[in-house]
Image (cartoon, rainbow, N blue to C red):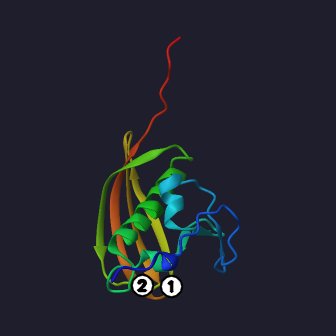
Amino acid sequence: MPIPREEWGIEMSRSKPTNIPDGFDVCSMDDGDFGRAQGQLFWSHDRRRFAFRVENRHRNENGVIHGGMLMTLADQVLGLTVVRALDNNPAATVSLNCDFIDGAKPGDLIEGEARVTRITRSLVFVQGSLHCGDRLLLTASGLWKRIRPQHRAG
């Protein structure tokens, strides 16, 4: 049965959220309109971890977070970690490999972290994971392409 629109939990206003998890702030790194439409992303005070609260609109038919939403969150966590490692220079996902281990329900707080394992002239290698409390939800690894600024002639 489809989820009624009023249960989607869509909140796209830019007002300051009132449900900021302890130890986290609102993530100030912009991930574009698509990222904002997924829900509020938080980052830890030390900027090493990210957090995301599961909403009703993120559920699949089984009532748990949709795998595509977990992959979206992994793409954000790994990608924003890459951008930080590149001193806020842009990068784009080339490859993202995810292994699903467990699920989460609406109201659960998912935390993610990633680490860059190698940077070359054109690519960045990164690994990460998503957890809900002590439960491992997903592991991920990926490649990001460094995007170099275009210089205009004349």
**Residue 18 coordinates in the image, percent (x, y):** 70, 76
Q: Nearer the viewer, residue 40 or 12?
A: 12
Q: Which mark is residue 104?
A: 2
Residue sitting at x 48%, y 84% = 106
Residue at the extreme bottom of the image, as rendered: 134
Left or right: residue 100 compared with residue 76: left
Q: Disc 1 on helix, strand or loop?
A: loop
In terms of image quadrants, where is residue 16?
Answer: bottom right
Disc 2 from disc 1: Cα separation: 6 Å
Residue sitting at x 49%, y 44% = 90
Which quadrant, please, contains the N terminus? bottom left
**Residue 14 coordinates in the image, percent (x, y):** 66, 61
Q: Which mark is residue 146?
A: none
CB under 8 Å between discs 2 and 1:
yes
In terms of image quadrants, where is residue 3?
Answer: bottom left
Left or right: residue 36 compared with residue 45: left
> Which kind of residue does numbered mark 2 sit on?
Ala
Figure check: 20 above or below 142: below
Judging by the rendered image, the residue that carries numbered circle 1 is 108
**Residue 41 coordinates in the image, percent (x, y):** 56, 67
Left or right: residue 124 compared with residue 85: left
**Residue 15 coordinates in the image, percent (x, y):** 70, 64
Q: How many marks?
A: 2
> Which kind of residue does numbered mark 1 sit on?
Asp
Q: Residues within 10 Å of mark 2 (few under 14, many from 20)?
A: many
Left or right: residue 104 compared with residue 98: right
Q: Nearer the viewer, residue 154 or 46?
A: 154
